[in-house]
Image (tube, helix red, strand yellow):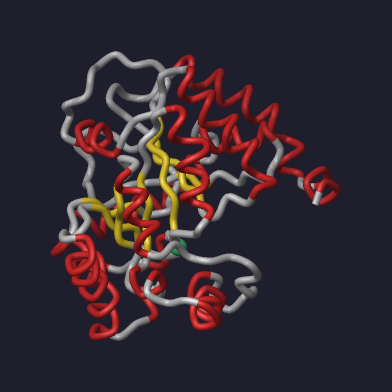
Amino acid sequence: MVIKAMLNPRHLAAPLWLAAWRAGRALFPEPAGSFRILLFHDVPKAERPAFAQLVQSLADAGRLITPAQAEARLNSAAPKGQGRPPCLISFDDGFASNLEVAETILAPLGAKALFFVCPGLTDLSGQAQADSIAANVFDGKRGANDLTILGWDGVERLMALGHSIGSHTLSHKRLTALSPDQCAEQIEGAAQAFQARLGAVPEWFAYTFGDVGSINPPSLAAIAARHRFCRSGVRGLNVPGMSPLALRADHVDLAAPPAWRQVAVEGGLDPLYRKARAALDGMARGL
Ligand SMILES: [Zn+2]
């Protein structure tokens, strides 16, 4: 993995790229009230030092915000005249490691994050869960290996720690690959499962796979009927007044070299996703 990382041209260029991006941001700072949503999945033990360092550095800079603070910013209720945009931390898929990270890294810093879970996977255990992780979460490209999904007790523990839970579909299906009935089952079925188990439908939804090709207008309309916020995996800044159904997020590869991780966290990859953001905004506007 080290050799692969050294040979990755993007990773090699990251320090220069980061310096150029920072110089540009110094001249043209991000709009007041803007924020980023960082996106993580499973955080294996080997990557926890990198995760801890990232969260600590954001906390030290006063740049960690809670889901409620992010919501307020979308409504232009945020304080003006900020420095670098703050970050909301989010996790997809509800892996068991999420709770360990919440207890050992987020809790000591008082950080509150957003965890997107799939009730249909939470309900499974053993081989059935492993098969579903491999088929649905990893799209048949790899096995679950030793990865497991948090049970409801784990989800409730996250809530007790002050974190927010969002819906990530019922069983991690790609919405654009489904019939209208199947799509409704994934969105509405998840909402009903949350209602039955946690007593409320989450305000937040993150559609699976996150790319702009994995969402379409009917799916987004079904999401909007049950949730206030829809987070994509499309990179970019979130700004006051934007559609809460077209939120951007930046996946951070914790296995990548530090400069590359920092490029992602600071928005250095934003220019590559202009078209995807425009398509997402167009869908949200058309609802
Ligand atoms: Zn996912």
**Viewed as shown, does residue 199 lie left or right of 205?**
left
Above or below residue 91? Residue 12 is: above
Q: Nearer the viewer, residue 109 or 85?
A: 109
Identify the residue shown where x is 54% and y is 34%: 268
Q: Residue 7 in the image: x percent, y percent? A: 83, 46
Q: Nearer the viewer, residue 105 or 15?
A: 105
Above or below residue 53? Residue 243 is: below
**Viewed as shown, does residue 64 lie left or right of 128?**
left
Identify the residue shown where x is 71% and y is 38%: 257
Above or below residue 69? Residue 270 is: below
Q: Quadrant of ligand 1?
A: bottom left
Q: Residue 235 in the image: x percent, y percent? A: 45, 46
Residue occupying the far right of the picture: 3
* Quarter-of-image position of residue 169: bottom left
Identify the residue shown where x is 32% and y is 24%: 31
Q: Residue 241 in the image: x percent, y percent? A: 19, 36
Above or below residue 82? Residue 269 is: below
Q: Residue 43 in the image: x percent, y percent? A: 58, 50
Q: Quadrant of the C terminus?
A: bottom left
Identify the residue shown where x is 39% and y is 69%: 122
**Viewed as shown, does residue 50 lie left or right of 287?**
right
* Quarter-of-image position of residue 256: top right
**Viewed as shown, does residue 80 lie left or right of 231?**
left
